[in-house]
Amino acid sequence: MLPQASRVIAVERETRDTFTFTVAAPGGGSGFAPGQFSMLSVFGVGEAPISISGDPGEPDRLVYTVRSVGPVTQALVTRRPGEWIGVRGPFGASWPLAALRGKDILIVAGGIGLAPLRPAVYYVLRRRGDYGRLVLLYGARSPQDMLYRKQLSAWSYLPDTQILTTVDYGGLSWRGHVGVVTTLFRYARFDAQRTAALVCGPEVMMRFVLRELETRGMALSDVYVSMERNMKCAVGFCGHCQLGPHFVCKDGPVFPAARVKRLMERYEL
Amino acid sequence: MKIPDVLETLRHLPFVKNFEPDQIEKLAVLAHEGRFERDQIIFREGDASSFFYLIVSGKVALEVTALGRTLRVQTLGDGEALGWSSLLVSEGKHFQARALTAVRALVFDGARLREACEQDPAFGYRLMRAVFEVLAQRLQAMRIQLLDLYSPASARA
């Protein structure tokens, strides 16, 4: 429950307000599972839940992609290599990738929702023979707001891998797709009967994605979503992140879509 | 491109999935092939161009100029419809369309399409229903786009 001091190793700018920084895992690292999050703190400022966006195959370092939207995240993104932050965790339920062996994996991400899904991509790529096709659909606000652009480009050349990106609007230099992430489905090549989908992004986006997946013949039992709520204690005591009968920090953030779909559609929950 | 070739191409486009065979033939007679080079402007905002297009291959961007800059607001690809406003008696195109890649399309004159719809209401119903489906999908996508989903407003930590 107590934060452990961790040294910042590297900071990389992703977009105008989003940074990826790497810290040394406390105590050398006990590993994490794709989809889990940590509570990161800047001493004297506060604490915020941040998804782990790095490679689970490198447990000695923890990577976080943080968008500066408030006092804590603003303080986090201004840390420099050699400075210290507090780390609690990792916490929460992960993408159930071990149980999905043998399936094609469809990843649908919007905005910074790609961050908690990147460890799932690393995981699948490290065990490529255990899975079928890997399809990643990613939507961002504009080309300047896209995360991990070089990496996405590199992955698109891998066999049995399809990476499709889109933006809500683009300038004349953008020659890629323009439209919401659901418009990418018509170009995605996957067999709904043997695919599992992992989805993360703004909740409204996820609702439309679930609808699209069902239209394309996918059973909700094969779909997982990562939910976001105001997490404080991260261990299911404080109730800040309650979502109906669930605590997102402890029971989630990754849920089977069938378990939370109705809750996602309920006003002010 | 001869009519049998147009017919064969048309049959593979999702736009006509609910058409009867004779209705597809009627549509084929009204089509000719159009080819556009990369970066070629297919039509400009405000153009009186009355053509309706079904993209056979390639990618087209819809652009709008606002506040002194041009924004791409949507891209269309294989099998998608372009220039639906030509099916209305319209004062002009609402967006600029630019070929992002080499584009091959079936091109229809809007006035002739409207005339065919008037003469054969069953054909007209089928065509307008197909256009309506396209519009419903675009409207839905545009509504989601307007939500500005990825704005940082909801995240405050």
Image (cartoon, helix red, strand yellow):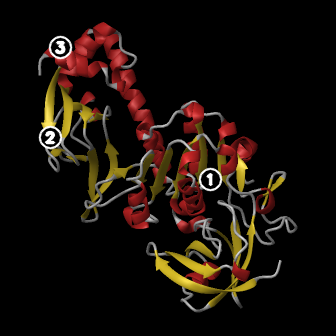
Q: Secondary structure at mark 1?
A: helix
Q: Quadrant of the C terminus of chain B?
A: bottom right
Q: Nearer the viewer, mark 1 or mark 2?
A: 2
Q: Residue at x 14, y 47 (%)?
A: B40
The type of residue carrying mark 3 is Pro
Q: Which quadrant of the figure has residue A44?
A: bottom right
- Classify mark 2: helix, strand or loop: strand
Q: Residue furthest right?
A: A237
Front-most of B16 and B86? B16
For the residue pair B142 and A31, the one nearer the viewer reads as: A31
Residue type (three-letter) at the residue carrying disc 2? Phe
Residue in the image at 56% along x and 64% along y = A115
Seen from this angle, which residue lies furthest front?
A129
Label 3: which secondary element = helix
Q: Amino acid at mark 1?
A: Glu
Q: Which residue is under mark 1?
A: A203
Can residue B115 be seen here?
Answer: no
From the top left corner, tell me how far across and down residue A53 is, in percent: 58, 67
Q: Is residue A84 above or below residue A38?
A: below
The image shows residue B22, relative to residue B148, as above or below, that is above
Q: How many neighbours does mark 2 have within 10 angstroms: few (below 14), some (14-19), or many (20 or more)?
A: some
Q: Chain of mark 1?
A: A
User: Residue B133 at x, y = what percent?
Assistant: 42, 28
Q: Which residue is mark 3?
A: B4
Q: Tell me how far mark 1 sits from mark 3, CA to CA.
A: 48 Å
For the residues carrying marks 1 and 3, which lies nearer the camera in this image?
3
